[in-house]
Amino acid sequence: MKTVLTACCLVGAILTAGCMSQEKGITLSVGGTPSELDFWESLVEQFEAQTNIKVNLLRQPTGTNQRRQGLVIALEARKKNPDVFLMDVVWIAQFAASGWLAPLDEYVRKDHLNLDVFFPNILNLVDRYQKQLIALPVYVDGGLLYYREDLLGKQGIFNAPQTWEQLVEYSLKVQSKMRKIRPDFYGFVWQGAQYEGLICNFLEFAGSNGGGIFLKDGKILLNTRANAEALRFMRDLIYTYKISPPSTYTEMREEQVRQTFQQGNALFERNWPYAWPLHQAADSKVRGKTAIAPLPHFPGGQSVSTLGGWHVGISRFSDQKSLAWKMVDFLTSSATQKQLALKLGWNPARRDIYSDPEVLKNMPHLERLKEVFQNARPRPTVPYYTQLSDVLQRYLNAVLADKLGAETALASAQKEAQEIVNRYQAK
Amino acid sequence: MKGYSLKELREAAPFLLPLTIFIVAFILVPVLGTIVDSMYLDVTFLKTRFTGLGNYLWMINNPGFWQSLGFTLLFVLVSVPLEIILGLIFALLLNENTAVRGLLRACVLIPWAIPAAISARTWELIYNYNHGLANFFWTKLGNSTSPINWLGSELGAFTSLVIADAWKTTPFVAIIILAGLSAIPEELYRQAQVDGANLFQRFSKISLPLIRPALIVALIFRTVDALRIFDIVYVLTHGGPGGATTSLSLYGYNYFLIGDFGYGSAVSVVLFFIAFILSITYVKIGRFGEELR
């Protein structure tokens, strides 16, 4: 018996020692395309050289849902790894409400970090949960209007459309001319397939008419006149004006939209900023012919852009929180943010980068983007947002498929969404 | 335990143990765990508490659940018979003694060997509105000026999914039935021929009864597989248009993704019981195991 006990203690001691020898490191979990991950490797090397903290880079896949799944499993199991990770803006509420994120206020205070450098609307609406700071933005995103300057110029139009009405008018003009040489040409391409992008688009159409998803005191409001008008307009783009392709509600996600525009088959495009460097690439047919502008609005409304982007947070279960904070600090530092902009074309979360001469020289369009981000509107920041989105996606998509009327769809969506609010509202 | 002495049982135990442990650890425990979890309000951002049948009640009142249940059952009802009939025809053809039989058998297996997600991507390109093969044939050979949005209507999306699924899984059915066919001794046919049985009689009186066990196996496999259809829906339609092609697996997956493990488990349990009941029905109806005695 005694020998067994001694053996157990020995093995235990060896195991703990093994763990302890690794203690001086942290695990960082990031995903993305292979080229992005290669860049992360180089960032991590810089960090290690600067701080002498060993970093284990946990490579995640490109797909957003897979990345989320990976993190949810690790955090639900209260694993110590990963210590630091990137989150899509729409996950943060769930992660925070689940108690998975460590508060950062203390570190900010200790390091005298100036939070004013970040976009205040983003920091206040997304990165705070119950008055605590639980994340910091790394990269910001927002919906934009891309347009073909050359084609509009031929019609004597030298400004981007201010209203949706103008967008339809310009589209019809150019489309009828262009169809003669390009039978697949469409006036306006946007994201209408049944997925998260559809909600982002809808919130921009609706928001620019004074609508949106309103959630207050456990009551959800969707079926408003402003929303119905906006939704009917989205449907009309396909069936009445016929300036958006019939495949809008089946195929059109970011990449399909970008490719259609990039092949020269569209006048206007709604997309995220990532499309800009690709449109300017050597093999692009719209290189040098494209400009960006804020999205149009309805009469009496104002342009709205849906906020996207990635944020960094620390796991509550991490046993290396102060080392992990060094990583957060590093990723949001102006040197790293500048690199992310120059190397990956990411839009910095720090406002000061937008006036950096070196960055502006390479990315002149950033000046325009700053305005857009300053007014970008987040999606509802509730932990059960994905479920609301899921319901809404189905009904909005059914309207675009011409299966349901706008009012009927919004009424049913509201009813079903209310059920979800009732289920998930913390009691 | 009738017919076994205690001594025999004691001798058999070590041989049965590994399999028993395997079944308990990898089948029984997870299934029971899922059933238990389905009775909890288990959401990452809420306090976990026991709700009994609460998740199931919520399911009954959820239109999304009924829509996906309807789609899933209809998909099984249409795709499985289609695949069985096509598979049977393929198997009969492949069983003939032709010079290229080996080559044909290998060719037929190719769709089955391709990973589902990849073949779904291929079908996505075929159905693509602007550059797809389907619309190429439709506009060029059909002489139509307007391409069709194949995945755009409920019927279109459903049919497209059935075709993509049938293409991929018919070979599987064909191979199982072919195994059954090859086991039938040649003499039976020759004797029937001597007795004056025609081709159809030989098929219905000899082949069909003797391949019934193989058919039942194919049916069970295909039905259970079709019930939990996920990959091609995930790639091709994402459940659209308007949620019309959201299969039960995709529906449950979406809840797991946001961290509602209790409800996701409840959906899995429902799916499990549907598959379980159908399998038992097949075994009973097909009088599986009574043949060839």
Image (tube, coloured by chain):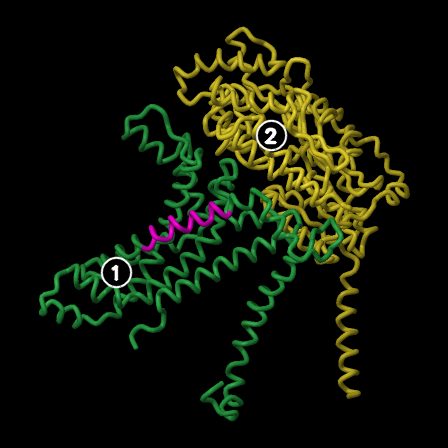
Total labels drawn: 2
Q: Nearer the viewer, residue B151 or B127?
A: B151
Q: For residue A259, say whether it is visible.
A: no
Tag shown at residue B102: 1
Question: Which secondary structure lies at badge 2?
Answer: helix
Chain under disc 2: A
Q: Which kind of residue does numbered mark 2 sit on?
A: Leu
Q: For residue A51, say whether it is visible.
A: yes
Q: Position of residue A140 (x, y in %)?
A: 70, 33
Q: Which kind of residue does numbered mark 1 sit on?
A: Gly
Marks 1 and 2, how far apart at CA: 58 Å
> For residue B151, which quarter of the picture?
top left
Q: Is residue A186 left or right of residue A360?
A: left
Q: Position of residue B90 (x, y in %)?
A: 27, 55
Chain under disc 1: B
Q: Main secondary structure of the magenta part?
A: helix
Q: Position of residue A240 (x, y in %)?
A: 48, 18
Q: Is residue A248 left or right of residue B199?
A: right
> For residue A178, which quarter of the picture?
top left
Quadrant of image for the N terminus of chain A:
bottom right
Does A192 appear above or below B87? above
Does A339 appear above or below A58? above
Question: Which secondary structure lies at badge 1?
Answer: helix
Q: Which chain is green?
A: B
Tag shown at residue A410: 2
Tag shown at residue B44: none
* Chain A painted colour: yellow
Of the two numbered discs 1 and 2 in the rendering, the one whose residue sits closer to the viewer: 2
What is the magenta range? B69-84
